[in-house]
Amino acid sequence: MKTKMLLKMLPIAALTIFAVGCGNSQNNNVNKNINVNDVKNVDSSKYLPRQLVNNEVKVAADSLFIVTNPMEDVSIQSVMILKNGKVIYQRWENGGDPETPHVMHSVSKTFCAAAIGMLIDEDKIRLSDKIRKFFPDQCPPEDEQSEKFMEMSIMDLLTMTCGHETEPDVRNSEQDWVTTFLHHPVKQAPGNWFCYNSVGTYMLSAIVQKVTGEKLVDFLTPRLFEPLNIDKPKWEESPQGINCGGWGLYLKTEDMAKFGQLYLQKGKWNGKQILSEYWIEESSSFQVESVPAGTRPDEVEAKGLTKENCSWLLGYGYQMWRCPENSYRADGARGQYIIVVPEKEAVIAITADTENLQRGLDNIFKYLYPVL
């Protein structure tokens, strides 16, 4: 039986299969209902341990798939929930598939930031490093560089506060993407003005490639993907052969869950420190005030946005959003989420194709969080 068929046929109440320790577990026992040794075509090292699901969790998680208004554009394609490092719920619907990588959109940003964290851990770069030092030949002439431009740092890129008031349009530019970014007006002092800027994350990917000589995906493969038993993923590139960084990564739902579990375990996996505990803490903590993509900080009040009705006002870390209940998330367009809930020792991975993002997050914290 192929892996793909096996995963889809498993009932939710018998999820304890493929039990290979997830970072903090040395227990390789499998559920007695299914002996992993009898499943010849399954590589058990690629799957997280499972355990029987709590019925309250199942009911709450199943409710995420229910569309109460047929006119709403809501399509949840997969949900996987981890509790104490084990999968307690999994479901794929609406074209979702356990063995088919799904586009991550801006969830990609958090993986790019992890690479920056690794380079900082290796003492190859610093948060305070100025962006211009990595690309001297693509910067404006020195006599045209403003003080604000010269102050732009890696930390400013990580926190979406590089000083841009708008995002550079690289797709319609005649210049390469790095040059386009570096010549875009820096109207605000870096560190003070939040502007959601995917091209800023592309610049982080370009820095990884500049410093290491490797594309972002190649840099992360032995350091992140292989230790977590994630197949080397597809990651889209610019015309200049640089991984997009802020978008274009494709992963399976279980890959997303593993990454969230790595953060929950403060960067440790199977006894090895993949990312420093310091980086996990800093990147997931509140660093700056935030606003939704496409909204200026001075437009929030006029749009009627508050922290009660807009989850994108709860703050931003290093390419991660803060959530209610002291949790945080990697967040991608149309409902891609990796939500880490330290107070519940839980991780929630979701893929979707929906426009109603706020409703989806509200449902998670209203119905699912209380029963975890």
Image: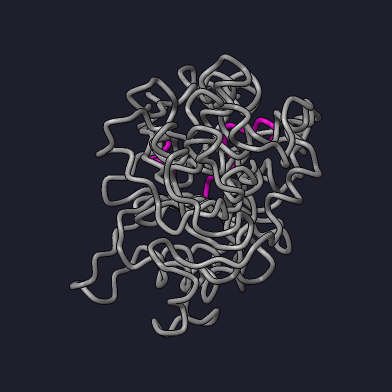
The answer to whether residue 12 is magenta is yes
| In the foreground, 8 or 169 | 169
Residue 290, given in percent of the width and then of the height, sits at 55, 66
Give the mark count.
Answer: 0
Residue 49 falls inside the magenta stretch: no
- Residue at 70% in and 30% down: 118
| Relative depth, front residue between 86 and 211 | 211
Q: In this view, does 344 lie to the left or right of 74?
A: right
- At a point 53% along the width and 25% down the height, the residue shown is 216
**Left or right position of 229 against 171:** right
Residue 360 sits above or below residue 26 on the image: below
Q: Looking at the figure, which quarter contains the N terminus?
A: top left
Q: Residue at x 35, y 53 (%)?
A: 352
Closest to the observer: 279 or 92?
A: 279
Q: Can residue 81 be seen in this view?
A: no
Outermost residue, left direction? 71
Along the horizontal axis of the image, is 61 left or right of 69?
A: right
Tell me residue 129's x, y (percent): 70, 36
Q: In the rendered image of this protein, does residue 291 appear above or below residue 115?
A: below
Residue at image position (55%, 22%) is 209
Q: What stretch is highlighted in magenta?
A: 6-22
> As rendered, which of 145 and 123 lies closer to the eye?
145
Say above or below: 315 vs 84: below
Q: In which quarter of the image is the C terminus?
A: bottom right
